[in-house]
Image (cartoon, rainbow, N blue to C red):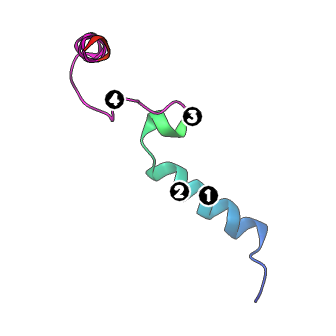
């Protein structure tokens, strides 16, 4: 088995990062799963669920 060269690894990594959602590429993925709803509504629903 041959070792991939540095340029190949760099290109593969760049391609992989380009395919990630912006939040994930920056290292802070959206915990709500990327929904388009108002985050305040999601937070309120989570609080209500915790209280139940």
Foreground tag (1 vs 4): 4
Q: Are marks 2 and 4 in contact (CB under 8 Å)?
A: no
User: x%, y% of residue 51?
Assistant: 29, 10
Q: Nearer the viewer, residue 26 or 15?
A: 26
Please rate how many residues cluster around mark 2, counting C-alpha atoms within 10 Å: few if below 14, some from 14 to 19, many from 20: few
Foreground tag (3 vs 1): 3
- State which tag comes first along the sequence, 3 or 1: 1
What residue did someone put label 1 on?
A: 13
Please rate how many residues cluster around mark 4, counting C-alpha atoms within 10 Å: few if below 14, some from 14 to 19, many from 20: few
Residue 30 lies in quadrant: top left
What residue did someone put label 2 on?
A: 16
Q: Are marks 2 and 3 in contact (CB under 8 Å)?
A: no
Q: Secondary structure at mark 3?
A: loop
Residue 43 lies in quadrant: top left
Q: Are marks 2 and 1 in contact (CB under 8 Å)?
A: yes
Which quadrant is the N terminus positioned in? bottom right
Q: Are marks 3 and 1 in contact (CB under 8 Å)?
A: no
The alpha-carbon separation of the residues under discs 3 and 1 comes to 15 Å
- State which tag comes first along the sequence, 2 or 3: 2
Residue 22 lies in quadrant: top left
Foreground tag (4 vs 3): 4
Q: Residue at x 60, y 64 (%)?
A: 12
What residue did someone put label 3 on?
A: 27
Image: magenta residue range: 27-49
Q: Is residue 32 magenta?
A: yes
Q: Secondary structure at mark 2?
A: helix
């Amino acid at each position: 088995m041959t070792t991939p060269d540095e340029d190949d690894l760099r290109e593969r990594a760049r391609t992989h990062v380009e395919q990630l959602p912006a939040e994930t590429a920056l290292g802070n993925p959206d915990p709500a799963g990327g929904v388009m709803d108002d985050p305040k509504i999601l937070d309120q629903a989570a609080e209500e669920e915790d209280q139940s």
